[in-house]
Image (cartoon, rainbow, N blue to C red):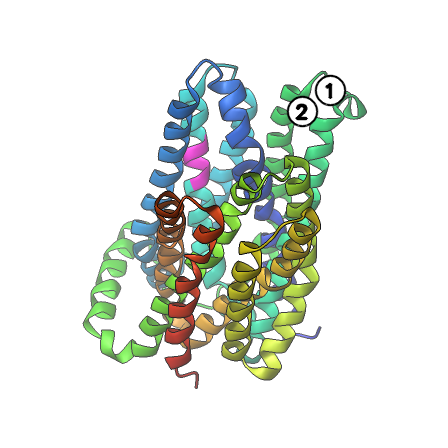
Amino acid sequence: MSYAHPRSVYAWAMYDWANSAYTTTVMAGFFPVFFKQYWASDMASSESTFWLGTGNALAALIVALLAPLLGAMADRGGLKKRMLLSFTTMGVVMTGALFLVGAGAWPWALLIYFLGAVAFSGANVFYDALLVDVAERSELDRASALGYGLGYIGGGLLFLINVLMTVHPDWFGLHDRAEAVRWSFISVALWWGVFTLPLARHVPERGGHERLEVLAAARAGFAQLRETFAHVREWRNVWLFLLAYFFYIDGVNTVARMAVDYGLALGFDSAILMKALLLTQFVAFPAAIALGWMGERWGAKRVLLLTIAVYALVCLWSAGMQQAREFYALAAVIGLVMGGIQSLSRSLYARMVPREEAAEFFGFFNMLGKFSAVAGPALMGLASLLSGSNRLAILAILWLFAVGAALLFRVEVR
């Protein structure tokens, strides 16, 4: 794939390869299990679940509330790249520090994890905003898809290695699974740090504003936020897209977060579910690239509507699922559209917002992404409680895709 500035685009996309190791190995994979079984092993399961959920919720809330202001500060001060690298450094240090936390020290583990999660989410605000600095407008769909594609393959590759470390610790000269998990945190820190170097060296920041110190940038950021809200009507399409994104990405996040729980409720073995997750991860790599190519030729909005329809069909199919092979098939189908719906949302949004205020607007984008992980799981839980059926509960999230598609259809893409 050709780009006007290929070195910058590939260096930018490698950051997705770098930080996706944190989402797969730490967030989704090992930390929740290790927290219960190692750091909080003497605590009641319900209590450890409460503390883990609280840590995740607080980290998401802090980033969601601060993201627009941090983005505005980065815009006005020319600080996007500097702030990304600062948050990344904090995330790398916190991830590596998990290795040092001993058994039973759950408060320290939770605090370090909380700081790492804040750093990870904060860095993504500026990473997304840099897309408009590395790619031309005609390249946004492909460049965004390249980032997500590399993220899926990079995160999946290290997660596969980390799983092998825990299943066969003797292959790696380790004594037991606990030691393997602790070294997995070190591997994520190194992976994240090393593969951030291309971005640090080769990604420019083409901001048109004068570079300011942090305090001056904060004052200018507040002023920029006030100005944005004062001209909301001028950005009708942007806010309409954000509202659509809030609904359909909530459906996407719910499918991702509740898939394993749903599979267990249907009686599938946990080994089948882990294999299905890995299948999704690796299918998503080429699929994200292909959908980026399709978005460039057919229009990102059309392809987004197509991916939303696929997600709706997945929900309908899963409500009647009976066999494990169907779960594998659904995992593959989700992999085909998961990366595309995320990457095309990012590129379509980047095409709609002003480059000189990209970080601020991506702050709103990431804020809604954080808040959108609330309604879907709550809706599924309530539907399951009222109906007594997990199969009916999965159908409850169809309305999220329906509302999101209806709002997206009204967005005018010029």
Contact between labelled residues 1 and 2, with CB atoms less than 8 Å apart: yes
Residue 286: where, in percent of width, then height? 70, 63
Instruction: Residue 218: name its quadrant.
Output: bottom left
Residue 107 is one of the magenta-drawn residues = no
| Residue lying furthest right | 171
How many numbered circles does the render carry? 2
Which stretch appears magenta?
113-117
Question: Could you tell me what secondary structure mostly forms the magenta stretch?
Answer: helix
In the rendered image, is residue 209 in sight?
no
Instruction: Residue 340: name its quadrant.
Output: bottom right
| Residue drawn where x is 20% and y is 65% of the image | 226
The amino acid marked with disc number 2 is: Ala
| Residue drawn where x is 68% and y is 56% of the image | 329
The amino acid marked with disc number 1 is: Leu
* Numbered disc 1: secondary structure: loop
**Looking at the image, residue 69 lies above or below residue 89:** below
Label 1 crowding class (10 Å Cα cut-off): few <14, some 14-19, many 20+?
A: some
Disc number placed over residue 174 in the picture, else none: 1
Q: Nearer the viewer, residue 271 or 166?
A: 271
Instruction: Residue 26: name its quadrant.
Output: top right
* Numbered disc 2: secondary structure: helix
Residue 400: where, in percent of width, then height? 40, 62
| Residue drawn where x is 49% and y is 39% of the image | 91
Q: Quadrant of the N terminus?
A: bottom right
Residue at label 2? 180
Q: Quadrant of the C terminus?
A: bottom left
Q: Label 2 vs label 1: CA separation?
A: 6 Å
